[in-house]
Amino acid sequence: MDPRLRLCGRWQKSTRTSSPSSVWVRDASDLRSIRRATQRVGAALPPGGLNLLINNAAVLPRGGLQTTSPEDMQSALHTNVLGPANIIKEFLPLLRAAVRAGGRAGMSCRQAAVVNISAFLGSFPSIEETYDFLPAISYRMSKAALNMLTLCASTELKRDGILVAALHPGWVRTDMGTQEADIDARESVEGMLDVVFSLNEKDTGTFLNYKGKVIGW
């Protein structure tokens, strides 16, 4: 087993859950759901706070400007941007507790870090290369906004010793990515683990792909 995945086993043991995973936020756009999850996680965590917060929930409306509805735009912005913003805000006390408990110099996911799962489609330089293939204007707008959230949060939370970065998982063969995608979920996850566990203070406020390459905003 990848030794980094043993962290999940230690989390399961420490929280006394019998299942491999627990769904504690059922709607990432619902502030009440997020606050309930924060309370449950805080109660379940061992002393020392929360070291790593990953914002991964997303929706992907695929239409272009002429076919995208206001509802599509609202859904993408609520789930892909407002959700992560509220999650970071509500979990901030647990992240700060991890910094205090860690007592380490510098920044890393072993101290306190936020990783926002973004997408190359939210990168401005990606338009010419990808737009005809997948317009997805609502999704692109939301991921560009998530990238700005990453920059703002990294600037604001640097004083707390909390690292914040955005990560592109690649084009992955999932329900969202379709079976035409370049890589499978295992390759994506293993690559992201390598990147996440190598992050340090020089990486806060950056946008990286699953291989650790910097992506232009």
Image: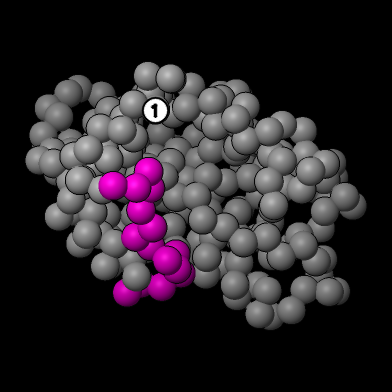
> What residue sits 25% from the left and 32% below the top?
10
The answer to which of 179 and 162 lies nearer the viewer is 179
The answer to which of 201 and 20 lies nearer the viewer is 20
> What residue sits 55% from the left and 32% below the top?
189
The answer to which of 135 and 1 lies nearer the viewer is 1
Examine the residues drawn in magenta and state their main secondary structure: loop
Instruction: Please provide the residue range marked out in magenta.
Output: 18-32
Q: Position of residue 110 (x, y in %)?
A: 27, 28
Specify the amino acid type for callout 1: Leu
Snapshot quadrant of residue 69:
bottom right
> What residue sits 60% from the left and 30% below the top?
186
Asked if residue 197 is positioned above or below residue 207 in the image, the reply reads: above
Q: Residue furthest bottom?
A: 70
Please indicate, yes or no, whether residue 217 appears anywhere in the rendered image. yes
Left or right: 20 as drawn, with respect to 212: left
Q: Position of residue 23 (x, y in %)?
A: 38, 58
For the residue carrying disc 1, how many other residues have a C-alpha within 10 Å: few (<14), some (14-19), or many (20+)? Answer: few
Q: Position of residue 145 (x, y in %)?
A: 56, 57
The answer to which of 178 and 126 lies nearer the viewer is 178
Asked if residue 18 is positioned above or below residue 102 in the image, the reply reads: below
Residue of label 1: 5
Label 1 sits on a secondary structure element that is: helix
Asked if residue 51 is positioned above or below residue 107 in the image, the reply reads: below
Q: Position of residue 93 (x, y in %)?
A: 18, 52
Left or right: 29 as drawn, with respect to 112: right
The answer to if 84 sits in the magenta stretch is no
> What residue sits 62% from the left and 61% below the top?
59
